[in-house]
Image (cartoon, rainbow, N blue to C red):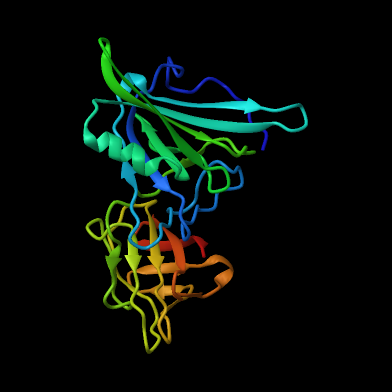
């Protein structure tokens, strides 16, 4: 898609430094699902899906010592992108050493959000994950660790943008699939029960804000629950090509809340 690259509107100094106020690490494990992107390949659709019992991890870094860079490498017919993320963590306590010991050798994806941004920039992909390289300084000038996350595999993709939710807690356990409450208190991830007798998924309440993405996680059973394009309790569900989704074990579907006045829609973004 060809676009004009003009100066950013409404910002007299778009090139000013943007300190990072959130840094999140995701381990690339079996069962991790990287959401689909839009047609540009930049905007991520849906939420990240983590394996059961896995969580994202936060990392603190000194604001002035954080760097999220990218460079292009290769010859004219074999160009690739290399994303790199560097952070400096002050101190030399045992928790820092445990962090280094655990994450060294792990394949990861790093999310970071700058002050004023409404998205997380995504460094790394499942096919070209980052790995941690650490250095420690302890001298008269200070004591701190520097974490450099770099890829070994080359990639044909620039960093992407993620506006979904982060995973620091267990998903909400749904008791009745025909009375699901999509509320801020329940969050964005909903784990459906395994059923012996199938039932149709319905939403008794949708109070999440416009644009929010919710993820339903299937657990199967002898007769899993199903979701179809139809008026479903408090919302109207619109699925891609009208294809029914079945909540088999380890399946998921991402739905986006769209409020058109008094009518609430849940549009399918992706499934797997």
Which of the 4 quarters of the picture holds residue 237? bottom left
Q: In the picture provided, is 247 more to the left or to the right than 145? A: right
Q: In the picture provided, is 91 more to the left or to the right than 39? A: left
**In this view of the protein, which residue sits in the foreground, 129 or 223?**
129
Q: Residue furthest top?
A: 140
Q: Residue at x 57, y 43 (%)?
A: 128
Above/below status of 214 relative to 152: below
Q: Residue at x 38, y 84 (%)?
A: 199
Q: Position of residue 126 (x, y in %)?
A: 53, 48
Q: Residue at x 62, y 39 (%)?
A: 155
Q: Position of residue 120 (x, y in %)?
A: 41, 38
**In this view of the protein, which residue sits in the foreground, 73 or 219?**
73
Q: Quadrant of the N terminus?
A: top right
Q: Position of residue 66 (x, y in %)?
A: 38, 24
Above/below status of 177 relative to 88: below
Above/below status of 198 relative to 9: below
**In this view of the protein, which residue sits in the foreground, 66 or 257?**
66
Q: Position of residue 27 (x, y in %)?
A: 42, 48
Which of the 4 quarters of the picture holds residue 189? bottom left
Q: Residue furthest bottom?
A: 197
Give the total of numbered labels: 0
Above/below status of 125 relative to 269: above
Which of the 4 quarters of the picture holds residue 217? bottom left
């Amino acid at each position: 898609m060809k676009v004009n690259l003009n100066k950013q509107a409404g910002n007299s100094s778009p090139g000013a430094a943007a300190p990072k106020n959130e840094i999140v690490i995701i381990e690339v494990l079996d069962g991790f699902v990287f959401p689909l992107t839009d047609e540009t390949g930049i905007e991520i659709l849906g939420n990240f899906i983590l394996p059961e019992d896995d969580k994202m991890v936060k990392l603190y870094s000194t604001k002035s010592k954080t760097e999220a860079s990218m460079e292009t490498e290769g010859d004219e017919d074999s160009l690739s992108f290399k994303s790199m993320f560097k952070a400096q963590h002050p101190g030399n306590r045992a928790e820092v050493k445990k962090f280094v010991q655990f994450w060294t050798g792990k394949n990861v994806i790093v999310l970071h959000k700058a002050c004023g941004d409404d998205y997380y920039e995504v460094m790394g992909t499942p096919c070209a994950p980052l790995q941690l390289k650490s250095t420690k300084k302890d001298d008269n000038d200070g004591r701190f660790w520097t974490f450099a996350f770099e890829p070994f595999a080359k990639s044909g993709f620039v960093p992407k943008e993620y506006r979904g939710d982060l995973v620091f807690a267990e998903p909400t356990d749904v008791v009745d699939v025909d009375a699901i409450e999509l509320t801020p208190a329940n969050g964005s991830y909903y784990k459906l029960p395994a059923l012996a007798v199938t039932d149709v998924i319905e939403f008794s309440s949708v109070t999440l804000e416009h644009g929010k993405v919710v993820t339903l996680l299937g657990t199967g059973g002898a007769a899993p629950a199903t979701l179809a394009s139809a008026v479903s309790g408090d919302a109207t569900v619109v699925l891609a090509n009208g294809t029914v989704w079945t909540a088999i074990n380890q399946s998921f579907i991402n739905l986006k809340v769209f409020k058109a006045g008094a009518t609430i829609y849940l549009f399918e973004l992706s499934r797997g």
